[in-house]
Image: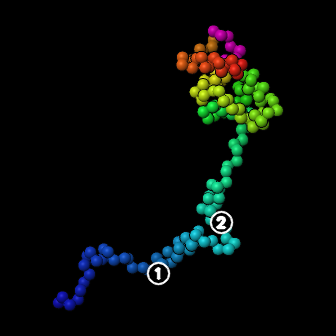
Amino acid sequence: MMDTESPSPTDAALAPPPVTVAAAASVAPVADAGRSVAAPAAGAPAPPAAVARKAAATPPPPWVVPDDYVLLVSCDGWEYLVETPVACISSVLAATLQSGFLESSTRRISLPDMRGRLLDRVVAYLYYARRWRGHPRAARPPFEVPPRLSLELLMAAVYLNV
């Protein structure tokens, strides 16, 4: 009675599932979509992958700073976006923005002698000065200066005429 050989349970687990007509129809669009991405037909729109590669090869346009802001850049590459009236508390920055130089049109001012940590405290002071302008000194809270930055901050204040 062993003439007929029945499949073992392991053979059934390893055998591929039978393909039905419905399964074959659902595979065809995927294959067509894959072919159209690899080789688009003549006149077909470019696939998203090709557009992404082209966009990556083209450099992005320069970042435009709005007219009501100024970008201050330190010597180590830190950038601070500051409101124009706040930046103009410094007479040096105000004169730079009102001049006919490149900085007035790009709204980007490089400060090659200031590190980012120092420029951070300068920007904080400019906002502090705007906030407490017109208040009596006794009503103002103290502006905290780290001791290790005090000399550099004093030199920056003199340079920027703040």
Give the residue furthest to the front: 113
Check disc 2 and give the amino acid type. Ala
Q: Which residues are magenta?
A: 128-138
First in sequence: mark 2 vs mark 1: 1
Can residue 110 be seen at all in this image of the molecule? yes
Examine the image and state in which quarter residue 33 appears: bottom right
Residue indicated by mark 1: 21
Can residue 120 be seen at all in this image of the molecule? no
Point 38% across, 76% down: residue: 17
Using the image, determine if residue 123 lies above or below residue 42.
Answer: above
User: Of 121 and 26, which appears nearest the observer?
Assistant: 121
Using the image, determine if residue 146 lies above or below residue 69.
Answer: above
Residue indicated by mark 2: 46
Residue 36 at what x, y percent from top left? 59, 71
What is the secondary structure assignment of the residue under circle 2? loop
Residue 134 is covered by the magenta coloring? yes
Is residue 109 toward the left or the right of residue 148 in the image? right
Q: CA distance from mark 2 to mark 1?
A: 32 Å
